[in-house]
Amino acid sequence: MFTDFESQWKKLNPEQKLVASFFEDDLNEGYSNYVVLLKITGFLGLLALTISVLGLLGMVVYTTETKVKEIGIRKVFGASVLNLNIQLSKEYLKLIVWAIAIGAPVTTFLIYLVLPRMQYYSTTVSVWDVVISTAILLGLGMITVWSQTNKAALSNPADTLRSE
């Protein structure tokens, strides 16, 4: 295909060399920096999420370990596992909701700041994107919290109160 163009170009303008490329190749070349940036951002986001979940897990383990005797006493007095889970999870649920309430608008603002700078690309962040992301983060946080609080709530109160 290029040979026909080259022969016609040489007839019309023999002094200049034909410089031609496919539009798709030009687009791919233009987006190569964004692809690298996307991979780095995705990796750093996953790393930040992993560190935050591990930090949350550490906080929950510490809290449940310090409240083992309280949990045992509540179980002796008839508290259900669900009630204990809710009691232990309240403060972490508040922290997670505050983090999402602060992080979602900031993230949306940053996305709208970056997207207009991209060539040939236009998109918006819908409410559903924020809702789904919020639900995933809230679910991940609550699974982390409930995994440890459930373990503490299911423990035998006789074992936890034995030293008293």
Image (cartoon, rainbow, N blue to C red):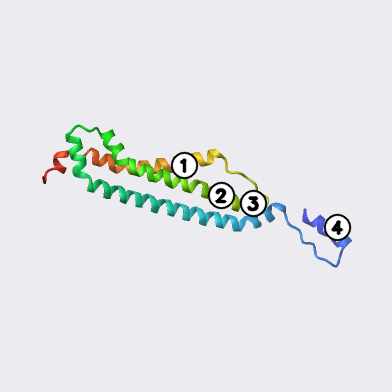
Task: Return the disc, 3 or 1, that comes first in the chain's sequence.
Answer: 3
Task: Return the disc, 2 or 3, that comes first in the chain's sequence.
Answer: 2
Reading the image, the residue beneath label 3 is: 116
Cα distance in 3D space between marks 2 and 4: 51 Å
The residue nearer to you, when weighing 25 against 107, is 107
Tell me the number on the disc at residue 109. Answer: 2
Cα distance in 3D space between marks 2 and 3: 12 Å
Mark 3 lies on a secondary structure that is helix
Task: Return the disc, 2 or 4, that comes first in the chain's sequence.
Answer: 4
Instruction: Give percent across and percent down for residue 25.
Output: 68, 55
Task: Return the disc, 4 or 1, that comes first in the chain's sequence.
Answer: 4
Q: Quadrant of residue 84?
A: top left
Q: Residue at x 56, y 52 (%)?
A: 110
Reading the image, the residue beneath label 1 is: 134
Q: Residue at x 55, y 57 (%)?
A: 37
Instruction: Give percent across and percent down for residue 68.
Output: 21, 44
Tell me the number on the disc at residue 8. Answer: 4
Mark 2 lies on a secondary structure that is helix
Q: Is residue 146 visible?
A: no
The reply to whether dot 2 and dot 3 touch (C-beta < 8 Å) is no
Q: Quadrant of residue 143?
A: top left
The residue nearer to you, when weighing 62 against 148, is 62
Cα distance in 3D space between marks 4 and 1: 58 Å
Mark 1 lies on a secondary structure that is helix
In the displayed structure, would residue 103 be above or below residue 74? below
